[in-house]
Image: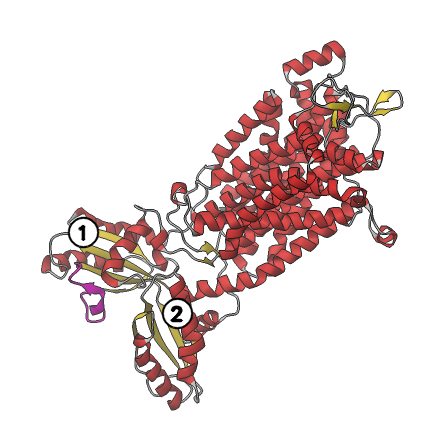
Amino acid sequence: MNSLAQWCFRRRRVVLGAWILALIGLAVAALGLGTAFKTAVALPDSESSTAYALLAEAGAGAETESGTIVWRTEGDAIDSPAVQEQVARMLADVTAQPGVEAVVSPYSDQGAAQVNADERTAFATVALADDADPEAIRSIAETLEAGSFAVGLGGQAFTELPSPSGGTEAVGILAALVILLLVFRSGWAASLPILTGVMGVGTSLLLVMIGSHALDVDATSLTMGALIGLGVGIDYALFIVNRHRKALMAGSTVPDAVALAVNTSGRAVIFAGITVIVALLGMFVVGLGVLTGMAQAAAVTVLFTVAAAITLLPALLGMIGMRILSRKQRAQLASTGLASPGKPTASGRWALLLDRAPRRMVGASLVVLVALAAPALGMRVGNADASSDPAGSPGRAYYDLMTPAFGAGVDATLVLVAEVPDAAAAQAFTELAEALPDVEGVASAQAAPVQPGQRIAIASVVPTTSAQTRETQDLVHTLRDGVVPDAARGTDLQVHVGGETATNIDIAAALMSKLPLYLGLVAVLGFLLLVVAFRSLLVPLVGALSNLATLAVGLGAITTIFQHGWGSELLGVGSGAPVMYIVPVIVVGVVFGLSMDYQVFLVSRMHEEWSQTRDNDRAVRVGVTETGQVIAVAASIMLFVFASFGFSGERIVSAIGIGLALAVLVDAFVVRLTLVPALMKLIGARNWSYPRWAERITPHLSLEGPSEPVAGVPLVVPEPVAVGATSTGPFASTTLWDGEQPRQTSEEP
C-alpha cells in the first residue's frame, strides 16, 4: 500500500488523467452503444411457474401482456349511442397501434360483463406484444378526457415501471458537503470525498450501462448502484482524508502524510469494500435474477469507489497539498510546526462516560434496539398494488375508477391451469369451476367447457379483495391446499394456481424462505473476516451479533413506515402496503457491509492500541475517542445520502433508502459507539484472547499497517479520575510517550 500511495503521489497528473479518460471513454461508449436493460423473468420453482409453463405449452399468453382501459361518464349513460361512438373511435385507434394483438370492447358480446350501468363505468381489455408502445396507447385513451369522461389505464401492460432516481441524490450530496465543511472548515477537505465518490460512481455506472448488453441487468440497478456507491464512496474517501489531515497536523510532509493515510486507513477501506462486495454477491444464494443483476451492479460500483479512494484520492491530495487544512490550521503549523494537543473532544468525553457506566449503556442500547427492531417480526412481504399508490397518481386514479364498479379484486385475477388427461379429470375440472363462486373470498369465476381431447383447461377466479391484501393471499392457499385437492381426489386432474397475483405470492415465499440462510451466511462471513483481521474470537462474535441487531432495526423501520404506513405518504409513495420482496434481501446485504465498515474502523483502532499497551480499558477509550467523530460524520453523510433516495417517489427505492438511512444511523450511534465499546469494556482483556491452534492456521492480515513511530503530538485521551485525585478540569488526561518523542496515536486506522 505504501508503494501504491507513493506512485500515485509522484504521478498524480497521470492518475488524474487516467480517471478522466476512463470516464470520457466509458461515456462515449455508453452513448454509442445505448443500454439494453431488461428485467430477468426467470421465476423460482413454484406452482405459479408451472402454470405459466402450461399456458405457454397451450399457446396462451406466452408473449403478451394484458392491460385495461377504464372510463366513467359524467352525465350520459355508459351505453348511450353517443358514448359508444366516441369509445369505438378511441378503441379503433388503439387497435391500429403496432403491437396491439387484441382489444375486447365492453360493447361486444365477449365483453358484456365489462359494463356497470349503475356506476356509469366500463372497461376494455388490451393484449400487447413485446414491441407495443404503452405510452402511445395511453395518449390515445386519454383523448376521451376532452369530453365528459374520466379515464384510467392499469393492469400489467400499463403499470409504470420504476424510473431512475431523478436527481434526488443531489440533495444528499449537498447535505454531505455542508457536513464536511462544518467539520473540516476547509473547502478542499469537504470537496475531495465527494469528488472521489462521484468519480467512482460515475465510471462504474457507465460500465454497468455497457454491461447491460451482456448481462440481465434491470434499469433500477443504476439507482441501486448510485445509492450504495455514493454512500460508501464518500465515506471511504472521508476516512483517508481524515487520516491524511491528522498526519499533516502532526508535522508530516505531504508525501509522508499521503503514504501514511493510504497505508493505514486505505487498508481498512479495502477490507471494508471487500466485505460489502461479498455481502452483495452473496445475494446469488437467493436465486432471483432481478436481485442478482442489482447485486452485480452495486458490487461493481463499490469496487470502483474503493479503487478511486486508494488511487485517485492520493493523487488529488498531492495536488492540493497543505490546502487540505483550514487557514487557521495552516497558520498554526507555520508558527509552531505542530498542532496543539487541545482539550478532550466530544467523542473523548463520550468514551469516558462509557468507561464509567458500561452496564447501563449496554442496557439502554438493548432497549433501543429491541424497540426499533420489534416491528420486523410482523413484516409481510408481497407486492403493492394500485390501491396503495399516492392519491392523484395514474395508478390510483385507475384503481378509484375500477373498484366501485367492478370490485377491489378485478385486477388480482387468479388463473387456474389444469392438466386434464382423461374424461374423468375433465369432469372433475368442470365441477371445480362450478363450485369456485361459492368459495369464501371469490367474487366470480368462469371457465370455458372442456372439449373432447383437450389436455389443458383454464379457469379464472376474481377475488373480492385486492392483490396486496392478506385475504387474497389466504384465498390462494385455500385453493391450493383445500379446494383444488378435494376436487381432484380420485382422478388424475392436476390444477395449478397461477397468475400475476399468485406469482408475487410465490416469489415472496421463496425469498423469505432463503432469507434465514442469507442472514446466517452474512453473519458467519462477518465473524470469519473479523477473526482474520483481529485474531480474536469474542470481538468477532460481538461484531456478528451486533450486525444482526442492526439488520433487524433496518427491517423494523421499513415495516413501520412502508407496511404500516407511518409516514409513507409524506415520502410520496402512498399508503401502507406489503414490503416488496426484494427490499429485505437488499437491505440485509448492504447494511451488513456498512456495519462491518464501522466495526472495522472502530475495532482496528482499539486493536492497534491494545497491541501497543496491552490495556483493554485504554484501548476501548482510545478507539472511541479517535474514531468517534469520523464515524459520526460518516454516518451522518450516509443518512442524508440514503434518505435523499427516500423521496424518489418510487416505493422500492424509497424503502431501501429510508431503511438503510435509519439502520446506518442506529448502527453508528447506538451499536458501534455505545453497545460494542461498552460490551468490550465489560469483557476486558479476554476480548483479545485467541487459541494457539487457531493462531497457527489463521492468515496474517494487518489493517493498521506498520506501527512505525511518526513525529507528532501526544494524544489526549480522557482517563477516569480516581477518588481523591486532582485534575485541572472535568476530565483528567494522559499522554502516551515513546521514548523522548511523542508517539503518534491521534489517528483512526
Residue stretch in magenta:
106-120
Lower position in the chain sequence, tag 1 or tag 2: 1
Q: Is residue 57 left or right of residue 143?
A: right
Point out residue 175 in the picture as x, y percentages from the top left corner.
51, 30
Residue type, numbered disc 2: Leu
Residue at x 44% of width, y 73% of height? 51
- The C terminus lies in which quarter of the figure? top right
Point out residue 436 in the picture as x, y percentages from the top left corner.
33, 77
Is residue 455 placed above or below 21 in the rendered structure? Answer: below
Residue carrying label 1: 149
Question: Circle 1 sits in a helix, a strand or a loop, which is it?
Answer: strand
Residue carrying label 2: 475
Q: Nearer the viewer, residue 224 or 346?
A: 346
Residue at x 46% of width, y 37% of height? 168
Question: Circle 2 sits in a helix, a strand or a loop, which is it?
Answer: helix
Q: Residue lying farthest top?
A: 335
Is residue 33 placed above or below 506 in the rendered structure? Answer: above
Q: Nearer the viewer, residue 597 or 75?
A: 597
Which image quarter: residue 363?
top right
Q: Is residue 525 left or right of residue 158?
A: right
Q: Are marks 1 and 2 in contact (CB under 8 Å)?
A: no
Residue type, numbered disc 1: Phe
Q: Residue lying farthest right?
A: 739
Q: Nearer the viewer, residue 349 or 7?
A: 349
Q: Which mark is residue 579?
A: none
Magenta stretch contains residue 112: yes
Residue 210 makes an appearance in the image: no
Between circles 1 and 2, the one closer to the viewer is 2
